[in-house]
Image (spheres, rainbow, N blue to C red):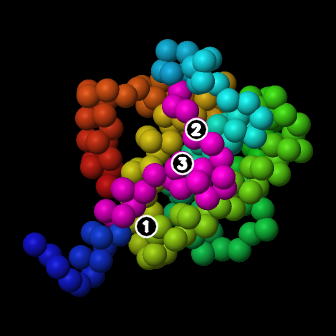
Amino acid sequence: MIRSGPLANFLLTIKQIIMTNLIEIIRKNLGYNELNKIDPNTQDVQSEVKIHGTDSLAQAAVPAILCGLYNHLQDPNAATLILEGDSVNWLDTIFGDKKKEVIDQIADYASTSVTAAKQESEHIANEAVRIVRQGIPDKTNFNAVQAFVTANKNDTLLYLPASLQLGYLLNNNNLDDRTNKMEGPVSSFMHKIEKQFNS
C-alpha cells in the first residue's frame, strides 16, 4: 500500500474528488432546498414533488451550470482558465455565446424573469468554480481535472431537466442521453465502470 509521496497525494486527491457531491455542496452553501432527481421516463421532476420559485430556479440552474462547467473542462486550455484565471463573469467563460440561450431556458423552466435567472445563475457559477478550484489542488495536473469531470458528471445528470436541451445547446449529445439519468443496479454498475475507464 502506498502511504506517502506524490503518487499517494494524487490518489488521495482522486478519492476526494470522487467522494464529492457538487450538487449537495452547492445546494447547502447557497441555502437551496433539496433538489430532486429527474424521472427518466418523463425527463422532469415528478409532478408531486416539483418545486417552485427559487428552488425551481436552482433545480434547473445548478445542474445546467455544472454540466456546462464539465463540458468546458474537457478542453485543457479551457480547464487552465477555469482553474487559474480571473473572471468577473464565469457564466460567459463557461457558456460563451450560448449563455443567453441557457439563461432563457433556465428562466423558462423556473417560470421566472430572465434577469432573476441570470443573477442567480451567476451566483451559482461563481460558487461552482470556487468549489472546483478547491477540489483540484494541483491545477497543473489535467488527469485530476478529467477525473473530477468524470466522477461528477453522471451524478449531476440525474438532476438535469431534459427540457433545458443543454446537450443540444452545447453540442454535446451525452448531456441529453436518457440512459445517463437512469439508476438501479445495472445502470449504477455501468456508470462506475465508465468512471473507472475514463479516469
Say which residue label 3 marks: 23
Image mark for residue 35: 2
User: What is the C-alpha distance between the residues marked 1 and 3?
Assistant: 22 Å
| Amino acid under disc 2 | Leu
Q: Secondary structure at mark 1?
A: helix
Residue at coordinates 47% horizontally, 45% vertically from top-left?
A: 153
Q: Earlier in the sequence, mark 3 or mark 2?
A: 3
Q: Secondary structure at mark 3?
A: helix
Percent from the top left, x then y, of residue 82? 61, 66
Percent from the top left, x then y, of residue 138? 44, 76
Residue range in magenta is: 14-38
Percent from the top left, x then y, of residue 126? 69, 62
Mark 3–mark 2 contact, CB under 8 Å?
A: yes
Image mark for residue 163: none
Mark 1–mark 2 contact, CB under 8 Å?
A: no
Q: Using a 10 Å C-alpha cutoff, classify the residue at mark 1 as few (fewer than 14 neighbours), some (14 to 19) or many (20 or more).
A: some
Q: Quadrant of the C terminus?
A: bottom left
- Whether residue 50 is situated above or below residue 174 in the rendered picture: above
Image mark for residue 142: 1
